[in-house]
Image: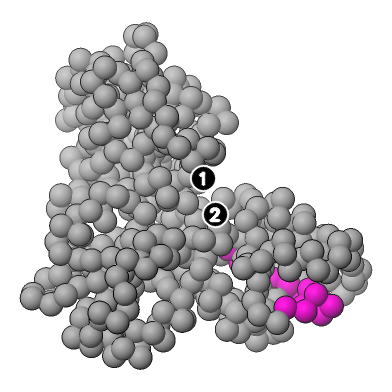
Amino acid sequence: MKTFDIPTYYRSPIIGKVKAVRKKLDKLKKDFSPSVLKFDGVTITLARHFGFCYGVENAIEISYRAIAENPGKRIFLLSQMIHNPGVNRDLEEHGLQFLQDTHGNQLIEWDVLTPDDVVIIPAFGTTLEIEKKLEDIGVSTAAYNTTCPFVEKVWKRSAKLGSDDYTVVIHGKHQHEETRATFSHAQSNAKSIVIRDMEEAQILADFILGKRPNEEFYERFKGCFSAGFDLEKDFDRIGVVNQTTMLASETQAISDYLATIMEEKFGSEDKKAHFANTRDTLCYATNDNQSATAALMDEPADLALVIGGYNSSNTSHLVELLEEKFDTYYIKDESEINEDCSIHHFDMHQKEMKHTASFLPKKENLNIIITSGASCPDVTVDRVIQRVADLLDQELDIEGTIASFEKRMHEGI
């Protein structure tokens, strides 16, 4: 696996050592059991996999290289580099400017750009329309295009489906940057539609089977299907791809469900002619992080902390998994944890911040689960651990605890 040159202040003295131990003992990443750090007074149970993924580290390396290679030039990001407020804030402090916000709203007009400006494509990729706009202005994006290779893999899968005359069903959040980009690329090769969840898949199935009037489709999925969509023929052959950060289990369930719908409509003998058996298009990091989070469900714990940007899709799905069993607090960083032992945390269902007093149970030997999204620096997790220790008035013996952890892992305890 390639290693990346990213600023040292994103590295961490605690999590970095834990990950080094796991890498040494499990090079093939087959062990998804948690990493358990037993400090005096508190046990921190960490997911096996979390934090910066390949695509994020690649994007960060390219962004800081763009800064170093272009002194005196104006440098723009199309939108947030990744969904982490700390990383984006640091890039802004280095002089980068955002052209759009995370929803695609314009912050700086296109006509201020010149061919001498540097524009960085974020890890989510961008639409063909924006690529053409930049090309017309004369801005070259080839040198600093940070589009994640796993996102590009979805685009290639969509193109193949289109070439085989399948309609592309995209499982994703239609306003998310990645899904907007994927939809743009997909519809250039095939009829395409975005559905958010199983509920929308079931509604779509009614249209495929002719159980709802066609005119209702155009209103129900307005803005989520490609131009010229013809219900009489464009659902004769379909294939499913996804936004790479969606829940793997949900994507698989949607794909399996739509396969049964096509079988119901066309019969089982000719199933392959109507439903493309595409392999899951989730990236390896999303799969690993979700599998590692699922493994935490078997652990004893008093609460769970999930760290990441509040607009981070992959982080929100980790929260979904953990809140099924634990009191789970979704925080962006250590600043959300207050000295009076209260916590500000994001309710992703209500889309609002909440305040909980005394979130740490009053008991000896607390056990706290911690994980983070793919765009969260490990050093932020370190700071959360240290903030919790401060609240508990605990002095963390990092070296001793890591040594004990390595010994237990080596002995299989």
- Front in this rendered view, residue 251 or 206: 206
Q: Which residue extends farthest left?
A: 72
- Crowding around mark 1 (Cα neighbors within 10 Å: few <14, some 14 to 19, many 20+) is many
> Residue 354's x, y, as percent?
42, 29
Above or below residue 51? Residue 6 is: below
- Front in this rendered view, residue 190 or 97: 97
- Crowding around mark 2 (Cα neighbors within 10 Å: few <14, some 14 to 19, many 20+) is many
Q: Earlier in the sequence, mark 2 or mark 1?
A: 2
- Front in this rendered view, residue 395 or 167: 167
Q: At label 1, which amino acid type do we have?
A: His
- Judging from the image, what secondary structure is the residue with disc 1 in? helix
Mark 2 near mark 1, Cβ–Cβ under 8 Å?
A: yes
Q: Which residues are magenta?
A: 229-243
> Residue 44's x, y, as percent?
34, 27
> Residue 121's x, y, as percent?
33, 73
Q: At label 2, which amino acid type do we have?
A: Met
Residue on which disc 2 sits: 246
> Residue 277's x, y, as percent?
70, 69
Above or below residue 286? Residue 98 is: below
Q: Residue at the location (47% across, 69% down)?
A: 151
Above or below residue 194? Residue 113 is: below
Residue 403 colored magenta? no
Q: Residue at the location (32% across, 78% down)?
A: 110
Residue on which disc 1 sits: 317
Q: Residue at the location (13% across, 77% down)?
A: 73
- Front in this rendered view, residue 356 or 152: 356
Say whether residue 29 is visible.
no
